[in-house]
Amino acid sequence: MFCYQCQETAGNTGCTQVGVCGKKPEVANMQDLLIYVSRGISAVTTRLRAEGKEVSKEVNHLVTLNLFITITNANFDNDAIIARIKKTLEVKKELLNELSNKDNLPPAALWESFDESEYPTKAATVGILTTKDEDIRSLRELITYGLKGLSAYSKHANALLQDDGEVDAFLQRALAATLDDSLSVDDLVALTLETGKYGVNGMALLDKANTTAYGNPEITTVDIGVGKNPGILISGHDLRDLEMLLKQTQGTGVDVYTHSEMLAGQYYPELKKYSNLKGNYGNAWWKQKEEFESFNGPILMTTNCIVPPKASYIDRLYTTGSAGYPGCKHIPGDIGEEKDFSEIIEQAKKCAPPTEIESGSIVGGFAHAQVFALADKVVDAVKSGAISKFVVMAGCDGRSKARNYYTDFAKALPKDAVILTAGCAKYKYNKLELGDIGGIPRVLDAGQCNDSYSLAVIALKLKEIFGLDDINDLPLEFNIAWYEQKAVIVLLALLYLGVKNIHLGPTLPGFLSPNVAKVLVENFGIAGIGTVEDDIELFFGKV
Ligand code: FSO
Ligand code: SF4
């Protein structure tokens, strides 16, 4: 196996024996093959579109779900991945029949085998290292990881019956382009930036889907303690799953708690109206071994991030959608279907209520509409100097000790600085008592990692209000934490929007070759992180 797609990759160069995430070599290899066949089918759909033929939504959804499944910590279930490979090959076979011109298709578009005993051998020939030039490899993977993130966001929008055919067409065109040996480094750099453009569109689509279905997030105080009823803990990012679970648990005496990224569900009017939606339990994804144990009831993983579970609670862990883990029950249900969570609810009834691990509350819901509603207050605070700067600290949390930097950085910020956050990175500082500035909390949580889009919309609005020509002239710094591939699409989207001098940590991606890293540094001023003291001085001058 060789995988270097996430921030925790071994030695920041690549996992080769087993994933730091717990991914086994055979699963890593089948994921490589799933990516290969997804590239192959994308070459076929891209040719079909060029011939003026329609590609169905079902095919688009097939490709996006394939990519989503290979995101870090989403799916560890080899059988599920093999089933996706076969399904993709079947669909591709039919699509090939519709093509008028099959000349010069890449080998991935033509390869086919329904005998899974051949898959390991094939997988060994299609992995990341088969691209020999390190810069081409780096750019192909950077694009692929951005597309994985984009797929995740598209899939969530699709679950709410929203599609953007242009995003899907781009996604497949770009995926197919990673097979094209005629593309130069410059071509691939251009495609990387174009990926960012569609990243913005994909996040806008999801924002529209979420707000159309559930209203605009609003300021919400979320309890982090527990009640007396048994509970179901729902994690991951899929709000449609949360809605179905809330509906089905009403009146059963079972409460629903959110975990990690699902916290954002609490901010939406059409979700928070359910009286059986209790508080948020626990913290970011990587603490789940302890927190799932003490939760006592069943846990539903709707997407990443799964940590390989302990035997003590594996019988309480369920997956759905892109998520999967061998030995955990997977709840099926396609887009537009009502999933049946009754088995989880029945199990919950027999479980003890959650053990309290924290008490108090956290405040969130500062997505674009809510911040716009407070715009006068915010603008006045900036004009009067009460707020000196905003610091975007969106992204992911993770296990590495180096991430304590973000807690220390938040604590060390001048008291007139406000943090804009989204994603599970917030758990590094959302329970600190950072106070407020004239009623504006110093940590404004927009929601999930995809709600970084909201932060960009807010920045663009501030640019307009202050009459600036350039987003980089705002009193705004970007100090982003990354872990997996959704953060890659967020980064590319920000670059496309013209944001410069983003600090990215705790380490720069291992998949960036020295030359590709140089392009990002020279053109966009991307930098790593330093010590807390140095970075505070860099952003604020001597304080
Ligand atoms: Fe976190 Fe995991 Fe949302 Fe990621 S739960 S790390 S960027 O999946 O997607 O922020
Ligand atoms: Fe390693 Fe990350 Fe890949 Fe897991 S996802 S195998 S930790 S690089």
Image: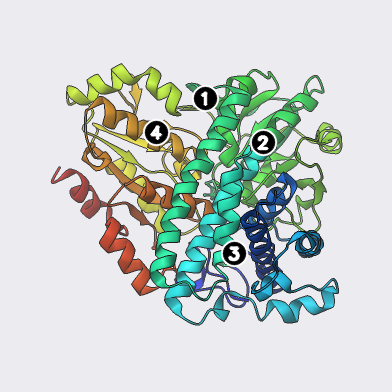
Mark 2 touching mark 3, by CB under 8 A?
Answer: no
Q: Is 271 above or below relative to 495?
A: above
Asked if disc 4 is less than 8 Å from ligand 1, the answer is no
Give the residue displayed 43% in from the left and 48% down from the top.
493
Mark 3 touching mark 4, by CB under 8 A?
Answer: no
What amino acid type should be assigned to the residue bearing mark 1?
Pro
Q: Earlier in the sequence, mark 3 or mark 4?
A: 3
Query: Which residue is labeled 1 in the image?
Result: 217
Q: With 446 as the anchor, is 118 left or right in this view?
A: right
Q: Is 455 above or below relative to 271?
A: below
- Distance from Cα at disc 2 to Cα at disc 3: 49 Å
Local crowd size for mark 2, using a 10 Å CA cut-off: few (<14), some (14–19), many (≥20): some
Query: Which residue is labeled 4 in the image?
Result: 457
**In the structure shown, which secondary structural element does the residue marked by tag 4 occupy?**
helix
Nearer mark to the viewer, of 4 and 2: 4
Q: Quadrant of the C terminus?
A: top left
- Distance from Cα at disc 1 to Cα at disc 2: 29 Å
Local crowd size for mark 4, using a 10 Å CA cut-off: few (<14), some (14–19), many (≥20): some
Q: Which mark is residue 176?
A: 3
Query: Would you identify the image quadrant in which residue 115 lies?
Result: bottom right
What amino acid type should be assigned to the residue bearing mark 3?
Ala
* One can see residue 494 in this view: yes
Q: With 120 as the anchor, is 305 left or right in this view?
A: left
Local crowd size for mark 1, using a 10 Å CA cut-off: few (<14), some (14–19), many (≥20): many
- Distance from Cα at disc 3 to Cα at disc 1: 37 Å
Q: Earlier in the sequence, mark 1 or mark 2?
A: 1
Nearer mark to the viewer, of 3 and 4: 3
Q: With 78 as the anchor, is 456 left or right in this view?
A: left
- Image x and y of residue 420, in percent: 37, 36
Q: Quadrant of the N terminus?
A: bottom right
